[in-house]
């Protein structure tokens, strides 16, 4: 949840200084180099590709070829009353950093530039997409945090269940040991009694032996 809050704060901060995130540049489409604008988002490319394609689909049918997403006759009133040849690319050389490039051909090879009055429309489009993408990222972070919290709950619950089972096992072992101790006590008392009886038997056997020895000596004396 904390990460989601931080993401929201960063989103607001970036929107305030958004104009600085749009830069002029160029990209090669086929054999032609097109002038346009790009911005970089700290979001994985796989998410941006899906969201960018969805976002610009409101302007017309999107033709995708790997990292390019083009609309041959885009209906973008905020840029031009006439159809616009929108050529875009989504590229990334880092896991969590993705660049979107967009070139707006308003006809006859005339590209929208920073000095063109249509630039405000382009800026607004990119600004709207930035907000759209960051909000989706915020949702993903929140869902990820929720999933991690769910997994953590399942993990601690599993640990709790194991502890409960170990306690029951310990109780059973204790009861078994107490029973064995009681049985051992009974067995010890029996052995002690047997020992006492045996000592008496030994004494009786010793006395009997002595009497037999005396009797034997008397008999021998008579014979002599």
Image (cartoon, grey):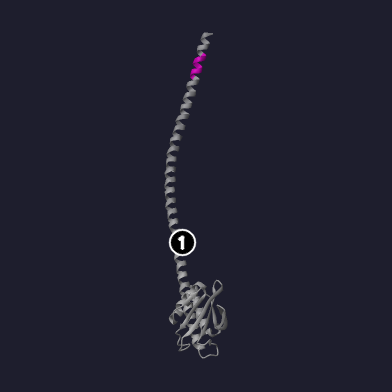
Find the magenta span and give its range. 211-217
Above/below status of 200 relative to 135: above
Local SS, label 1: helix
Q: Which residue is mark 1?
A: 155
Residue 44 seen by the camera:
no
- Residue 162: image x %, image y %? 44, 56
Q: Hey, which residue is sitting farthest top in the picture?
A: 224
Q: Main secondary structure of the magenta part?
A: helix
- Residue 186: image x %, image y %? 42, 39
Figure disc tally: 1
- Residue 108: image x %, image y %? 52, 87
- Residue 179: image x %, image y %? 42, 44
Above/below status of 111 relative to 175: below
Q: Quadrant of residue 180?
A: top left
Of 149 and 76, the residue lying toward us: 76
Check if residue 58 falls in the magenta segment: no
């Amino acid at each position: 949840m904390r990460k989601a809050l931080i993401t929201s704060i960063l989103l607001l901060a970036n929107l305030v200084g958004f104009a600085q995130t749009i830069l002029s540049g160029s990209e090669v489409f086929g054999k032609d180099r097109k002038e346009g604008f790009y911005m970089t988002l700290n979001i994985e490319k796989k998410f941006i590709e899906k969201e960018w394609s969805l976002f610009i689909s409101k302007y017309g049918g999107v033709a995708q070829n790997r990292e390019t997403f083009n609309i041959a006759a885009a209906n973008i009133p905020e840029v031009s009353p006439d159809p616009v040849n929108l050529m875009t690319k989504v590229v990334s050389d880092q896991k969590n950093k993705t660049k979107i490039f967009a070139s707006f051909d308003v006809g006859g090879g005339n590209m929208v530039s920073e000095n063109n009055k249509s630039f405000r429309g382009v800026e607004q489009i990119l600004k709207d997409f930035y907000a759209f993408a960051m909000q989706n990222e915020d949702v993903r972070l929140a869902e990820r945090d929720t999933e991690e919290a769910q997994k953590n709950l399942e993990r601690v619950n599993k640990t709790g269940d194991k502890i409960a089972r170990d306690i029951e096992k310990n109780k059973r072992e204790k009861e078994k040991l107490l029973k064995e101790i009681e049985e051992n006590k009974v067995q010890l008392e029996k052995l002690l009694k047997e020992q006492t009886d045996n000592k008496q038997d030994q004494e009786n056997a010793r006395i009997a032996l002595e009497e037999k020895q005396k009797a034997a000596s008397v008999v021998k004396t008579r014979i002599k």
